[in-house]
Amino acid sequence: MGARAAPTGRRLSIGAAVTLVIVAAAATVSIGIVRSGLDAVPIETVPDAAPSVAPAAVYVHVSGEVAEPGLYRLDDGARVVDAVSAAGGFTDAATPEGINLARLVSDGEQLHVPAEGEAPPVGTDAPGASADGTINLNTADLAALDTLPRVGPAIAQRILDWRDEHGRFTSVDDLLAVPGIGEKMLAALRDLVTV
């Protein structure tokens, strides 16, 4: 007798199972290909935008023996040399020795460059002097600070050193942070200085 043929239903089940395995394998391979393709695609990142902060500004009126007298906007922390440079530099008649080029300028200051033979500036043009006659702690030089009562050259130098190390005075009360200045000295100076 000959071999018996397998039932038709069983052949379909085995065929369906094989087909299902092939489809599952193809799907797994396809997913793997897609995933590896995604890994190769560079992801574009946008850096955090750092807020741009414009430097603080001071306005200085430069007059006298400079090429272009006028009002100039300078970065906070600018010095007299920067103001003179912004005004085009000295004229031939200027006396550069009449001003302290290394001194910090302050907002609203008038800087006068004297001519040869001109008397040194007094009043509001003097280094550190304000319109009301007080001494500006942020612009005064050693000589101007030394004119204050109870302040000699040593304390004046400490004020300049503090200013160089910590930046501009924001209040007259900041003088208490200067070595050698206490409450009594501050009380004596309070009406004579400004920032």
Image: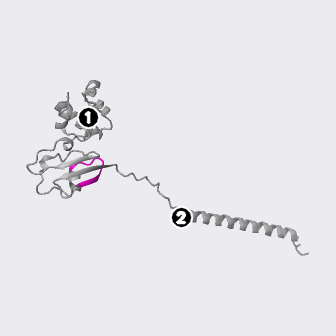
Q: Quadrant of the C terminus?
A: top left
Residue 91: % across, % down: 14, 57
Q: Amino acid at mark 1?
A: Val
Is residue 135 toward the left or the right of residue 57 in the image?
left
Could you say which quadrant of the image residue 34 lies in? bottom right
Q: Is residue 80 above or below residue 191?
A: below
Mark 1 neighbour density, 10 Å: few (under 14) some (14–19) many (20 or more): many
Secondary structure of the residue carrying numbered label 1:
strand
Q: Nearer the viewer, residue 74 or 165?
A: 74
Q: Which residue does the numbered mark 2 point to in the structure image?
A: 40
Q: Is residue 159 magenta?
A: no
- Residue hosting label 1: 193
Residue drawn at (18%, 31%) of the image: 154
Give the crowd class for mark 2: few <14, some 14-19, many >=20 residues within 10 Å.
Answer: few
Front label number (2 vs 1): 1
Image: magenta residue range: 70-80
